[in-house]
């Protein structure tokens, strides 16, 4: 049985494995062996990927989206509050309370000044450093950490807890025991935070979810709030930070597109969406088949696993004839970089806001930004569900003050 094609930064640092083009053309649904020992049907065409993601009744999210890649994903049924692995009304109960905080357009517009301030503060911090620096450690991760922590009013001194938990969760070598050990301090901290917010509500996301939930027939338990908060902190921290670093690297390696963005910061929104489409989300998302069915004519049995190849789908010529080309001006379209259907990324509007703010500011404020090492020396993350460079050494001549750029 062929192995699941995995990202290969040496062959294709920005592209899906080259095998996907042949699979889309000749074997769009094929059986593969995955790194954690799971055997699954690999789905590679855009239309078929949307079909799977859009039908949770046939294709359940209960195993967890990365159980084919990461050992730390438990095989047990979803625990209390583990809403990303729930389906139907059970999943909707959680999503309807979280989505208004990170997806509602009015809410997102209200967060713009906060995100802009955080980006400006990190650029000011960079200006005080002597390059070269690691872009991921000194800019991308602090930005996304600050944004998501501000939403929950987590002080800076406590933010290392979810960085440590995310590091263990997204590491392919981490066992279930490793993940549990890393998550326990975070859960303990968040439990205390839940109790505090119940007693003294504030204007943060957690306080508002408690208030909204308490007005329903089935209010959230303390444990459900802890798990929801942990999911928000971890997912919002590393996925967006990695995209900020990976996206910058892609732009540095496509200087004509970076120059377009520098000349016209209004392209930042379409550039953000294009980078999500172009770079994708690793080695696909896992689903479990709930009933005997078919995908593209291939019969599949209940209990089988399916991996939808997101990056392959986003490069399908059926979506864009020139899908292998990076185009920061490409009109926002129906790519599946944020997923599709009921389980599409609940925080995608917040991620878009962060990416757009960074892409509008950085080319203007650091026009001389460049790699500090040869491209071939850059180390990429391996055995993980989140792609991107492990470190990104960059340098510059000057970081321009915001007032100078605006003037």
Image (cartoon, rainbow, N blue to C red):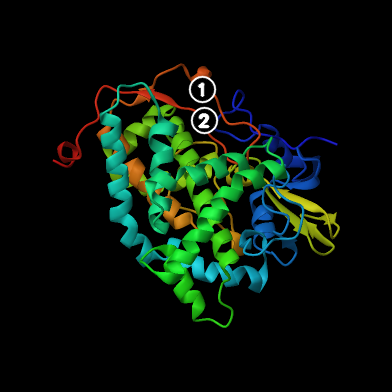
Q: Which of 33 and 267 is in front in this view?
A: 33
In the picture shown, does residue 183 fall above or below 349? above
Residue 338 in sight here: no
CB-based contact (under 8 Å), mark 1 and mark 2 = yes
Mark 1, other Cα within 10 Å: few <14 / some 14–19 / many ≥20: some
Give residue 289's position: percent from left, percent from top.
79, 59
Residue at image mark 1: 378
Report the quarter where the N terminus lies.
top right
- The answer to whether 15 is drawn above or below residue 159 in the figure is above
Of callouts 1 and 2, the N-terminal one: 1
Q: Tag 2: Cα neighbours inside 10 Å, few (<14), some, or many (≥20)?
A: many
Residue occupying image coordinates x 43% and y 66%? 197
User: Residue 194: x, y in percent?
Assistant: 49, 64
Q: Left or right of 55: which side holds 253? A: left
Quarter assignment of residue 141: top left
**For this rendering, which residue is in front, 230 or 39?**
230
| SS state under label 1 | loop
Residue 102 in view in this figure: yes
Residue 152's place in the image compared with 271, above or below, is below
For residue 389, which numbered disc appears in the image?
2
In this picture, is 255 found above or below 360? above
């Amino acid at each position: 049985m062929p192995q699941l094609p995995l990202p290969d930064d040496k062959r294709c640092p920005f592209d899906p494995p080259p095998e996907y083009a042949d699979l889309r053309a000749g074997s769009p649904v094929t059986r593969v062996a995955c790194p954690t020992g799971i055997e699954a049907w690999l789905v590679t065409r855009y239309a078929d990927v949307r079909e799977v993601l859009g039908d949770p009744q046939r294709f359940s999210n209960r195993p967890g989206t990365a159980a084919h890649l990461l050992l730390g994903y438990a095989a047990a049924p979803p625990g209390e509050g583990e809403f990303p692995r729930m389906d139907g009304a059970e999943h909707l109960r959680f999503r309807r309370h979280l989505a208004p905080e990170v997806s509602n357009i009015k809410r997102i517009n209200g967060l713009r000044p906060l995100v802009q301030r955080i980006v400006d503060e990190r650029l000011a911090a960079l200006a005080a450093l002597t390059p070269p620096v690691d872009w991921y450690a000194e800019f991308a991760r602090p930005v996304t950490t600050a944004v998501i922590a501000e939403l929950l009013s987590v002080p800076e001194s406590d933010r290392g807890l979810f960085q440590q938990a995310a590091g263990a969760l997204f590491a392919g070598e981490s066992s279930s025991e490793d993940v549990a050990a890393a998550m326990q301090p975070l859960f303990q901290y968040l439990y205390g935070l839940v109790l505090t917010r119940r007693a003294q509500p504030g204007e943060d996301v957690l306080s508002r979810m408690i208030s909204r939930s308490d007005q329903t027939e089935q209010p959230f338990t303390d444990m459900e709030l802890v798990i929801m908060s942990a999911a928000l902190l971890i997912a919002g921290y590393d996925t967006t930070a990695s995209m900020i670093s990976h996206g910058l690297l892609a732009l540095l390696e496509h200087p004509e597109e970076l120059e377009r963005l520098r000349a016209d910061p209004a392209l930042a929104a379409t550039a953000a969406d294009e980078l999500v489409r172009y770079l994708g989300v690793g080695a696909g998302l896992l689903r479990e088949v709930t009933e005997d069915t078919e995908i593209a004519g291939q019969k599949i049995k209940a209990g089988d696993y399916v991996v939808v190849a997101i990056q392959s789908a986003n490069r399908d010529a059926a979506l864009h004839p020139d899908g292998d080309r990076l185009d920061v001006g490409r009109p926002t379209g129906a790519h599946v970089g944020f997923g599709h259907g009921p389980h599409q990324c609940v925080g995608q509007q917040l991620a878009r806001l962060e990416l757009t703010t960074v892409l509008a500011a950085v080319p203007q404020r650091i026009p001389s930004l460049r790699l500090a090492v040869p491209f071939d020396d850059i180390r990429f993350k391996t055995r993980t569900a989140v792609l991107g460079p492990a470190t990104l050494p960059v340098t510059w001549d000057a970081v321009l003050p915001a007032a100078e750029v605006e003037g």
